[in-house]
Amino acid sequence: MSSHPTDFQGSVIDAIRAAVEGAIPDARADVTGGGGHYTIVVTSPEFAGKGMLASQRLVYSAITHLMKGDNAPVHAVDSLVTRTP
């Protein structure tokens, strides 16, 4: 796992999970990783009828604030999976 400098305080995994679950109705986010690189799996009925790109855009828009700036806590999302329940 690589090291990624950040001035973020607290659990990045919890912050990602809270941001996604707060922005996408009835979402359940499973987040793993560290060092700036994360894997995210999100399950929500909101994705029904949407293509993969549209579903992934919803997730990325929820975590944009965690990816901004030189010392952002999220450097990369190595894998993003969206699915319906």
Image (cartoon, rainbow, N blue to C red):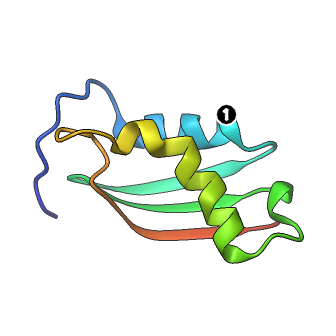
Residue for point 81% across, 67% down? 84
Is 56 on the left-hand or right-hand side of 13? right
Q: Residue furthest bottom?
A: 51
User: Callout 1, which amino acid?
Assistant: Gly
Is 47 on the left-hand or right-hand side of 56? right
Residue 64 pos. (x, y %):
46, 43
User: Which quarter of the rendered picture does the N terminus lie within?
Assistant: bottom left
Residue 85 visible to an observer of this rendering: no
User: Which quarter of the rendered picture does the C terminus lie within?
Assistant: bottom right
Residue for point 35% across, 33% down? 11
Question: Is the residue 74 above or below the residue 78 in the image?
Answer: above
Image quarter of residue 43: bottom right
Residue 58 pos. (x, y %):
65, 53
Few, some or many residues within 10 Å of mark 1 (<14, 14–19, 20+): few
Which element is circle 1 on? helix
Residue 50 pos. (x, y %):
81, 70
Residue 60 pos. (x, y %):
53, 53
User: Looking at this view, is 48 or 68 the one in front?
Assistant: 68
Number of marks in the image?
Answer: 1
Question: Is the residue 31 above or below the residue 5 in the image?
Answer: below
Image quarter of residue 2: bottom left
User: Looking at this view, is 63 or 16 the one in front?
Assistant: 63
Residue 7 visible to an observer of this rendering: yes
Image quarter of residue 15: top left
Q: Which residue is mark 1?
A: 22
Q: Residue furthest top?
A: 9
